[in-house]
């Protein structure tokens, strides 16, 4: 079993979650990405969000939300993605950067355009009354 280790930002506004679509991809993903070298979760989150959304995470605001696993979208069977999610505040105005093509606020009815691990997270958020 292969596991892809990813860190992600859960940002909710008006019952919708911030999501991104990378160039060449057909699904939206919760923003974040893979750890580099010996980065901590916080360091990975700060770097990935800066690279993808052009904003600075406020380190003191980072709070663990949960860890979720599912089949990795577009990968061979048995390749799992482990998504460790955090809530955090940021400074700046969000804009797509690097590989990000689109930024969109999604709700629970958007399950058909997101990855498998994001579906699990969307269900968790819906069950907690955070996602409409």
Image (cartoon, rainbow, N blue to C red):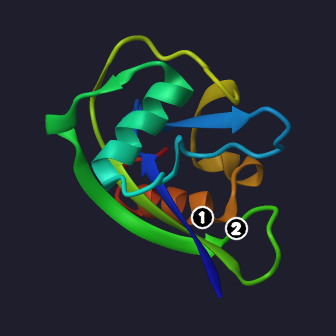
Residue drawn 52% across and 28% down? 51
Mark 2 or mark 1, earlier in chain: 2
Q: Is residue 66 left or right of residue 80?
A: left
Quote the CA–CA distance across marks 2 and 1. Answer: 7 Å
Mark 2 neighbour class, 10 Å CA radius: few under 14, some 14 to 19, many 20 or more:
some
Q: Quadrant of residue 3?
A: bottom right
Residue drawn 40% across and 30% down? 13
Residues tagged 2 and 1 counted as in contact (Cβ below 8 A): yes
Q: Position of residue 114 (x, y in %)?
A: 70, 51
Q: Quadrant of residue 78?
A: bottom right
* SS for dot 1: helix
What is the number of the mark on residue 72? 2
Q: Is residue 20 left or right of residue 84?
A: right
Q: Height in image: 124 above or below 43?
A: below
Residue picked out by circle 1? 117
Q: Position of residue 37 (x, y in %)?
A: 45, 55
Residue drawn 40% across and 68% down? 67
Q: Please name whichever residue, 61 or 47, is drawn nearer the observer in this view of the structure.
A: 47
What is the number of the mark on residue 60? none
| Residue farthest to the bottom, as pictured | 1
């Amino acid at each position: 079993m292969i596991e892809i280790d990813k860190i992600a930002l859960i940002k909710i506004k008006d019952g919708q979650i911030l999501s991104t679509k990378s160039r060449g991809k057909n699904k939206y993903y919760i923003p974040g990405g893979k750890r580099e070298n010996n980065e901590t979760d916080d360091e990975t989150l700060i770097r990935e969000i800066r690279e993808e959304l052009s904003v600075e995470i406020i380190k003191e605001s980072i709070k663990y939300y949960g860890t979720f696993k599912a089949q990795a979208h577009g990968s061979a069977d048995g390749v799992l993605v482990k998504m460790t999610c955090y809530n955090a505040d940021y400074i700046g105005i969000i804009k797509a950067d690097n590989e990000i093509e689109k930024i969109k606020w999604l709700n629970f009815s958007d399950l058909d355009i997101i990855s498998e691990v994001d579906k699990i997270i969307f269900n968790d958020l819906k069950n907690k009354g955070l996602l409409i």
